[in-house]
Image: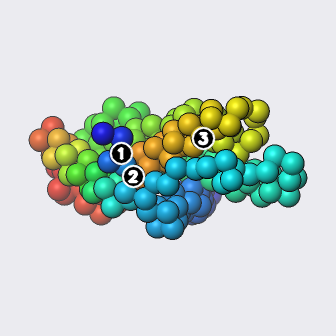
């Protein structure tokens, strides 16, 4: 699982996915 | 006038600090895109004062830049009387508040996960070779977590100023 982070592309992808999830949650909360 | 100047300077320092700190992470992600395990030959020579001084400067620079970035961001919110509402994710301050929570995790990760391990990797504190090599894996993962978290933080920093309509 931690090996996922071994590529910086995966880091960026996870960052974008996290952004999308948090943005949707924030939108739903308002 | 003074109030505007204070906020302008704080915002300027906030950007500068963030560039020094997160720029270091991004530069590493670009120059070393894949994890390559360290070997004994990669570790710095503990007997080289020049190497040690350079490493201390490099690592001290972005570590303290993180405090400047966090502190100037908190100062801006506090100065506007927004800090509490932001941290409790109220209304239009929720995006920047969420950004601040994520950034707080990043500062804690840097100071309390990465740095204690980095000290071992770089030889600032004595540790056996296998412990230093293990610590280098932790520092890599810790840095990558911060790189990942910086992406939503930048999004919510931007949203607080330019995209609030999306969340209201």
Q: What chain does badge 3 belong to?
A: B
Image quadrant in which the N terminus of chain B is located:
bottom right
Q: Marks 3/2: CA distance?
A: 16 Å
Q: Residue visible at 74% across and 51% down? A: B44
The residue that mark 1 highlights is: A3
Q: Residue visible at 66% across and 54% down? A: B42
The image quarter in which residue B82 lies? top left
Mark 2: give few (<14), some (14-19) or many (20+) Cα within 10 Å. some
Q: Residue visible at 46% across and 44% down? A: B141
* Secondary structure at numbered mark 1: helix
> Where's residue B167, x and y in %?
18, 50
Q: Does the residue at mark 2 contact the one at mark 1 (Cβ under 8 Å)?
A: yes
Which label sits on residue B14? none
Nearer the observer, B98 or B147:
B147
> Where's residue B168, x and y in %?
17, 49
> Where's residue A29, x and y in %?
15, 38
The residue that mark 3 highlights is: B133
* Secondary structure at numbered mark 2: helix
The residue that mark 2 highlights is: A6
Q: Marks 1/3: CA distance?
A: 16 Å
The image quarter in which residue B93 lies? top left
Q: Is residue A13 left or right of residue B166?
A: right
């Amino acid at each position: 699982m931690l090996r996922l982070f071994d590529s910086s592309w995966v880091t960026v992808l996870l960052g974008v996915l996290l952004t999308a999830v948090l943005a949707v949650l924030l939108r739903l909360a308002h | 006038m003074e109030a505007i100047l204070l906020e302008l300077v704080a915002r300027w320092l906030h950007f500068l600090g963030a560039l020094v700190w997160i720029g270091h992470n991004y530069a590493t992600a670009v120059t070393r895109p894949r994890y390559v395990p360290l070997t004994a030959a990669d570790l710095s020579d503990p007997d080289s004062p020049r190497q040690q001084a350079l490493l201390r400067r490099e690592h001290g620079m972005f570590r303290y830049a993180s405090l400047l970035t966090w502190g100037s961001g908190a100062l801006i919110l506090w100065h506007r009387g927004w800090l509490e509402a932001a941290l409790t994710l109220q209304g239009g301050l929720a995006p920047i508040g969420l950004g601040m929570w994520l950034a707080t995790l990043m500062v804690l990760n840097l100071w309390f996960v990465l740095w204690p391990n980095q000290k071992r990797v770089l030889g600032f504190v004595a540790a056996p070779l296998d412990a230093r090599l293990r610590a280098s894996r932790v520092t890599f993962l810790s840095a990558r977590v911060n790189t990942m978290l910086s992406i939503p933080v930048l999004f919510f920093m931007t949203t607080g100023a330019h995209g609030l309509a999306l969340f209201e």
